[in-house]
Amino acid sequence: MKTHALASALLATLCAPDAAASPPSPSAVTLGSVDARKGSTGPLASRQVLTSVDVLAADRIADKNVGNSWELLGQMPGIQLTETRQGAESGKASFRAFNGEGYINGIKILIDGIPSNVNSGNQRFVDMIFPLDIDYIEVVRGTNDPRYGLHNIGGNINFGTRQGGIYTDARLSYGSFESREVQLAIGREANGVAQNYFIGTQASDGYRDHDRSRKYSLGGKWFIGSDEDVLKAGLVARVYHHVADEPGFLTATELASARRASPRKNANDGDVRDMRTLGAHVDLRLTDTLQLSNRLYHNRYEDDRQVTFTDYRPGNAPRQRRQWDERQTGLLSTLTWRASERLTVAGGINAEQQDNAYRRLRYAYGIPTDFDAVPARIQNDDRYSLDNVGGYLQAVIQPTPALKIIPAWRVDRFSGDTHLPGGIRAPLQRSGWIDQPKLSVAYAFTPSLNVYANWGRTFQVLTGSTAPAYLTPGQAAFRPSINTGKELGINFNPADGIQASIAAWQQDATDEVANMPATGTTVGLGQTRRRGADLQVNARVSAHWTLWASHAIQQATVISAFTADGRSLAGNEVLATPRHITNIGADYRPDARWRFGIQGRRQGDYYVEESNQHGRYGGFSVLDASAGYALSDRLSVDLQVKNLTGRTYAYAWYDNFFWGGDNQPMFSPAPRRGLFVSLNLTL
């Protein structure tokens, strides 16, 4: 019945009178310069209708030296960076007190509007894109965005790449740890045809021993038509190859004595990763007020990882070769009806089919682990599918120029099965239709003062190839975890060139489950509560100076849960969640040729295991600086110093997952001071 009702509502939008588009919302906060997007045609932009949106522009992206593009998000407010630094498993970005360990992957990732999480929810497809190919990064926080279902628990991040234009941009970089990078971006547009190409390669010997990395990325985009035409259609294709060593984790003693060393047990650890994506975009303007937008995509993810976790002792389990082969095929279709200045209606449907394989091989004791030997045991040799269908309906109601009301409703349903060794077959946990009502309200007291509130529900479903995601014999049923979020905020412009916002939020979850990627197991967290406050200000104080600052206070707490031996976790903090994240920065441009920048980031300590009994780790304060000089209109050079003060800090996790483990914190140290020089050429 819900599917029929949704389809009827979408069909009803076909009878549409002419009208102008609703004006954009002042709720979004922008870092850098973004091309104006009026939103008079096409799907509704996030920053038009949602109430907690940040945008990072190309001029804050293209000149950054980063090992992986998720690191660019460290410039944005409230973003937690989990820097694991293990070869291709480099880390990820998260927010709203969802950690980046892989336990609960609560952030939806999109590239050009195409879903780009792997099955577990991890963000590996982000590594395919390099800074010079990125037009903007958009972060949507909270539970009130109805466009996406799977993995969209705390919000979503969309990496928008360059489309159209006429340019040839090249960037050559060299820096500390023998880091080398070449990027080439080409755009051509004429007679209604746009072509964009990108080639990128990056290599580094790494900060630590046994830390080499080589990656290559190639992309192309071909489009006909424009936003103003009746038809705009295009094809986007990318391929990526990455070969990397893994230096392994250090004990506290090893970290203190030789932080750049790699333990002998990890001498053969490494990763070979290949990813490919293909997306077809078709936008059709049915009438002046009715727009149909479609995205058809296919993602392929192949990974062969050799990893050794804990100390070398006979009988020790975590010596593993992990092999993934995931295929995702999907469709997103959105119909937008701009009925009048007071009403816009959008509805969408999506379908995704995943066909995945996962093998996990365990190896016997050895120093180092011999991954070419016959494995001691084949733990996993699984074939599994995950099918998702969903849809949403959203209205933007503006009864007065100052008031905007945005009700929405989303539904999702999942199915699939798994084939395990021994002839075991099992269906996916039965979730039924998952309802997700949402409501946002924004009121502009003045053109420079906007108050908003939102309420909404999102969900977590179990993923993976085995129980508890699938109902293997003896496995109990799990309900989807329902997250209910609410937020109250103020966006204001106290003076020309100054943007500021303050928000308080809370997100309560039922039946939350933490996936343990190191072991392939899960831990039920039961009821959890995440809450916090976000503050940020961006100020262009003169023609030469731009300043920004943000501070996020957050906490994730277990409300009701028990360990396997019956101990209550109530009142404990969810592991790997810092209580505060701070950003400050300044850009100075004395004239058209020179530019200088400085940015400070601070992230608090966090508990590394669920009992909260073994200390807090992982906090850091780091300062980065940059300078650039334009040698001509086409040629410029820039210098970046990362971790300017040479601070020592490290990512931390707790080794209590494995039989034979030492029940102690393990560390992956961050690089000390690094210097990078880049040459930029525009033809």
Image (cartoon, helix red, strand yellow):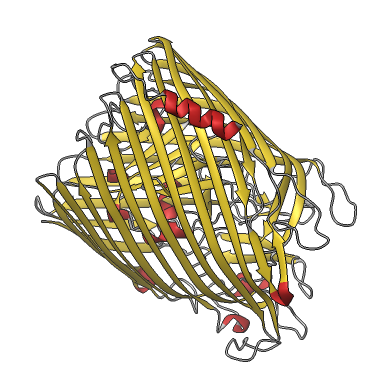
Q: Is residue 619 visible?
A: yes
Q: How many marks?
A: 0
Residue at the (53%, 26%) spot, across then down: 408
Q: Quadrant of residue 311?
A: bottom right
Residue at the (37%, 67%) spot, across then down: 240
Q: Is residue 180 left or right of residue 13?
A: left
Q: Is residue 113 left or right of residue 87?
A: left
Q: Quadrant of residue 95?
A: top right
Compare residues 519 and 279 and report the one nearer the observer: 279
Residue at the (45%, 40%) spot, across then down: 139
Compare residues 251 and 349 and report the one nearer the observer: 349
Where is residue 465 shown, x and y percent of the image?
65, 64
> Which residue is situated farthest in the bottom direction here?
373
Where is residue 152 shown, x and y percent of the image?
55, 43
Where is residue 463 shown, x and y percent of the image?
63, 56
Q: Quadrant of the N terminus?
A: top right
Q: Is residue 50 visible?
A: no
Where is residue 475 shown, x and y percent of the image?
80, 58
Compare residues 572 and 392 and report the one nearer the observer: 392
> Which residue is situated farthest in the right direction here?
566
Q: Quadrant of residue 316?
A: bottom right
Q: Is residue 425 left or right of residue 71?
A: right
> Which residue is situated farthest in the top direction here?
400
Q: Quadrant of the C terminus?
A: bottom left
Please, is residue 650 above or below residue 358 in the view?
A: above
